Every structure is written in structure tokens, then in C-alpha cells.
Image (cartoon, helix red, strand yellow):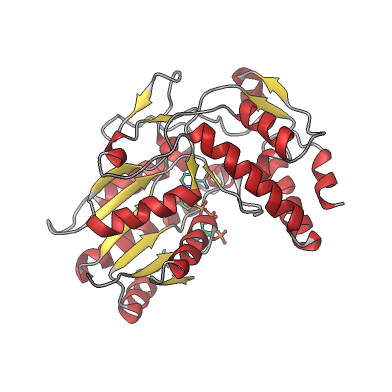
Amino acid sequence: MEKDKVLIFGNGQIGNFYNSYFAEQNIKSEITRADITDIKQVQKTIQKYNPTVVINTAAKTNLEWCGKNRLEAFNVNVLGADNIAQVCDEEKIYFIHFSSGCIFESKDENDEKNENSEPSPAAFYSWTKVWAEQLIQSNKSKNFRFLILRPRQPVSSQASHKNMLMKLLTFVNFVDTPNAGTVLEDLMDWTLKILETKPTGILHAANQGWTTPYQIGLMLKKYILPNLEVNKITKKELDKITPNRRVDTILNVDKLKNMGVEIKPYKERLKEIIKSLGENIRKADKEFLKQELEKTAIFSKTRTKVNSEWKELIK
Ligand SMILES: NC(=O)c1ccc[n+]([C@@H]2O[C@H](COP(=O)([O-])OP(=O)(O)OC[C@H]3O[C@@H](n4cnc5c(N)ncnc54)[C@H](OP(=O)(O)O)[C@@H]3O)[C@@H](O)[C@H]2O)c1
């Protein structure tokens, strides 16, 4: 079988994770910084690189920013995503688009959402993810091969400001409500399987099971930052301090499992990932780490109360 050549839109957390992973796997890939709101740029970039697979990770991902800049968020997350879909349809290229599990809100840990569940977006950002899904599936040829992936709260062992675990290291308050999650290291392996068979439609991409931000906070305290204060707050209290209401989402991942993919339990993987993140933090260049944690803390401040203990990590 001929190896794939992958073009990645979006020079952010997941795009870069893919690019490094594909390099390790000897799969040709490239990240483009082309503006996805400009269909001509998208077309030119795709025709020039001539990929067999296009992955779209480009989006405006900050909930607070999207809430305040609706038109621009819509332009990038919805119209931009569809620009790539249109070109992939015309050029007959397999298209993987990143949507999000946050289009759903689960009542409790038993309220699992599967690929056919009805979305119930709470924030404008989540609406843009739903609209993009709908538009990608509209007005395309019947042979268009696309896969819409829905991850949930990605975490990894990378000491990067985009990593949710790094964000939580700067928090003070943690809710104790069940949520699914996607370990990015595992998503990479699942993607290899996806590239083998190139399934189409919608696919939930999360680890098995769930945990709570409070439980994650306790693990971060145990393995990375012993002085981290982990205060439990209620959802009601959180809603008062955060500009955009956060949802809890439990994803059913049977469809991914039925593809023959090994999906490891979220709680078990979190423990491993947090331990590796601790090692990566300890061995990181202090100046780099300072910059990443500062960026994380600035972002955290826009939505919650920030601790000062994180500064111990850069001493
Ligand atoms: N991170 C999460 O919690 C999460 C959860 C579920 C699903 N997802 C989805 O997964 C995908 C990737 O997420 P991520 O964590 O990698 O996000 P990310 O780190 O914010 O990366 C997104 C990238 O897209 C870029 N971008 C914005 N507007 C663009 C445009 N017009 N043209 C080209 N690039 C543009 C951003 O640049 P700027 O920073 O300069 O704007 C950023 O580099 C997104 O679709 C996101 O909605 C993310």
C-alpha cells in the first residue's frame, strides 16, 4: 500500500502534534499556515502539496474570544472549514476535520452521547463546531470522503501552554463533574488506524471512561506540584466566575472501538501522562517553561482564579 502524504491546516496544538508524529512514523506531512478563510489560498496550497489526506485542525478555539468575536469565529470555524472541504471534494482527497465533543452536554456520567445524538451547544464556539459539521456534509459530491472527528478536552505530556493539564496547574478551583477526555498521544495511534481504512462520517475520538477536573487536580498535586491548592467548587459557583458556561460531556466511543482500535482507559492513561508531563517539566529549559506557563496563566485569568504556586515549577 502506498504511504499517505498529509497536509495539515492549523499550526496549533493538535496540528503540531500530528506533524511530529507523522515524521516519527515516516509519513510525509506538512503544516500549512495558509489562511483557511481564503478559498483561493486553500486551493493553491492543496494543489501545490498534492496530498492524499488533508487534516483540518485550524480554528479559533478560545471560547471567550469566540463569544466576543462571533463574525470572525464563524468565518474561520465554519466557512473556513467548508472551504477546505470544498477543495478536497473537487480534488478527491480524503478529508479529516476536527470538530469537538463540546457540542454535547451530559447530565451525568451515564448520559453518554454517541455519534447520532442531538447536539446541544452551550457556547458560541460550540455552535460554530456544529454548523461546520453541517456545512461540510452539505452540497458536496456523493463521492466526497470525509471524517469528522470529535475529541474532548485534549491532554498530553507536552509542557506546552495549550495543554489543558498545564492550564489546570495554574487553577485554584476545580469542579468535580464527570467528563470524557482525549489523550493526544493515543489519538495519534488511532489516526494511523484511520488512515489504513479511511472511514467516513462522524467519529468520537476520546479515551474510555471519564474523570473530573477535581480528580485531575489531585493527580497534578501528587505528581507535579505538591503545593497546588485543589479546592472543590460547584458547577453553579464556576458558572458565576467564568464568562462562558462550561459543559460536561461523556462520549460513547464504541464506534472507534469497533474499528479495531485499542482505546485505553482515560483514568489510567491520565496517570501515565501526568507523570510524563512532570518529567518533561523538570527537564525543560527554564526560560521556555516560564514562557509557556506565563501564557497559560494569562489565558486562565480570563476565565477563572489563578494560583501563584505554578511559579515554583520554574525555580
Ligand atoms: N483544544 C481543545 O480543547 C479542543 C477540544 C476539542 C476539539 N478541538 C478542536 O480541535 C482542533 C485543533 O485544536 P487545537 O487544540 O490544536 O487548537 P489551537 O492550538 O488553538 O490551534 C488552532 C490553530 O488554528 C489557527 N488558525 C486560526 N485561524 C486560522 C485561519 N484563518 N487560517 C489558518 N489557521 C488559523 C490558530 O492560529 P491563531 O492562534 O493565530 O488564531 C491556531 O494555530 C480545532 O478545530 C478545535 O476546535 C480542540
Of residues 37 and 259, the one nearer the viewer is 259
Q: Position of residue 283 (x, y in %)?
A: 74, 57
Of residues 134 and 58, the one nearer the viewer is 58
Of residues 277 and 147, the one nearer the viewer is 277
Report whether 236 appears left or right of 125. right
**Which residue: 40% across, 18% down?**
110
**Which residue: 55% across, 22% down?**
177
| Rendered view: 82 above or below 234 | below
Report whether 234 appears left or right of 118. right
Report whether 44 appears left or right of 181. left
Q: Is residue 34 visible?
A: no
Q: Position of residue 164 (x, y in %)?
A: 60, 43
| Rendered view: 194 above or below 68 | below
Q: Position of residue 196 (x, y in %)?
A: 26, 59
Q: Position of residue 277 (x, y in %)?
A: 65, 48
**Which residue: 60% across, 22% down?**
176
**Which residue: 41% across, 36% down?**
103
Q: Quadrant of the N terminus?
A: bottom left
Q: Is residue 187 visible?
A: yes
